Image (cartoon, helix red, strand yellow):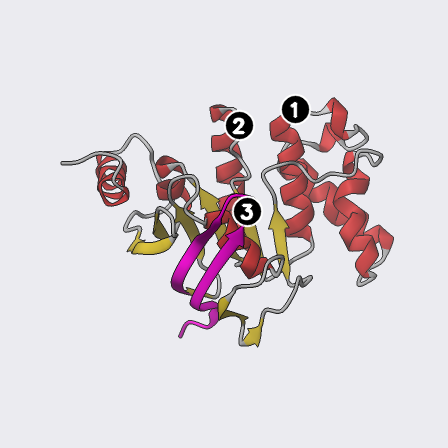
Amino acid sequence: MFILAIDIKNVSKSFITKDKDFMALKDVNLHVDDGELICLLGPSGCGKTTLLRMVAGLEKPDEGEIYDRGELVEGPSKERGFIFQQYSLFPWLNVLDNVMFGLNLSGEHSKEENLAAAERYLERVGLADFKYSYPHELSGGMKQRVAIIRSLLNHTPVLLMDEPFSAVDMLNRHTLQEQLIGVWKRFETTILFVTHDVDEAVYLADKIVIMDKRPGRIKDVVEVPLERPRQRESREFLDFQDEVEKLLGVWEP
């Protein structure tokens, strides 16, 4: 039996600009089960990031409600981690201290336990040799790995990710995707992942939520029928990617 983690009910959101008002999202309904990895896929401007920010509690819907495990979302919560497109690292802290920051702040474990956990994860993602480096000394992919580890080590039940790999080169992006899958399996985290990359959505997701252009609506919700680990070069992967592109309207059959 699945437990409902995130429940989005009849959500609409408008913004007022200097020139005019515009509706970003209209009547969005989405149910996310505990432990699911959901990708929100759609063109720029369709409201993916706005929806994610409302789930995080950073924005409030004009209409409708969002629930996190039965509780109305009324603001940010330490139960919901958020990874932005830009690397939100503290520039004055080294890698190890960045990773341990939230752990030490929570006070749930001793500093020795936090240190052991941080070093273990840095080793797993190939950053053990850089634990005393500062953010300006790291590549983009390395910075994002640090940001992801920091969020995952906080063990938030829900992790919200806004195109976190978009600025990373393809090789590192694929590596980070594999590492995300590994940690997601280990901790059974519920993940909402915003992307405009069809390949990324097909590789990562249990379900793909396809969004239509403004005002943003959910056009379709597609279960990904591919077993893990997924092989990008396989015929099944490529065929399903074509199906998603058709639904998205990337090309007409």
Residue 138 covered by magenta stretch: no
Residue 50 in sight here: yes
Which secondary structure, mark 2?
Answer: helix
Report the Cα–Cα distance between label 1 and label 2.
Answer: 10 Å
Which secondary structure, mark 3?
Answer: loop
Give the residue at mark 2.
Answer: 172
Image quadrant holding the N terminus, namely bottom left
- Residues drawn in magenta: 1-30
Q: Are marks 1 and 2 in contact (CB under 8 Å)?
A: yes
Q: Residue at x 55, y 39 (%)?
A: 164
For residue 76, what is the image quadrant? bottom right
The image shows residue 43, relative to residue 22, as above or below, that is above
Give the residue at mark 1.
Answer: 139
Residue 89: percent from the left, percent from the top? 73, 38
Three-letter residue code for mark 2: Asn
Which secondary structure, mark 1?
Answer: loop
Q: Nearer the viewer, mark 1 or mark 3?
A: 3
Give the residue at mark 3.
Answer: 17
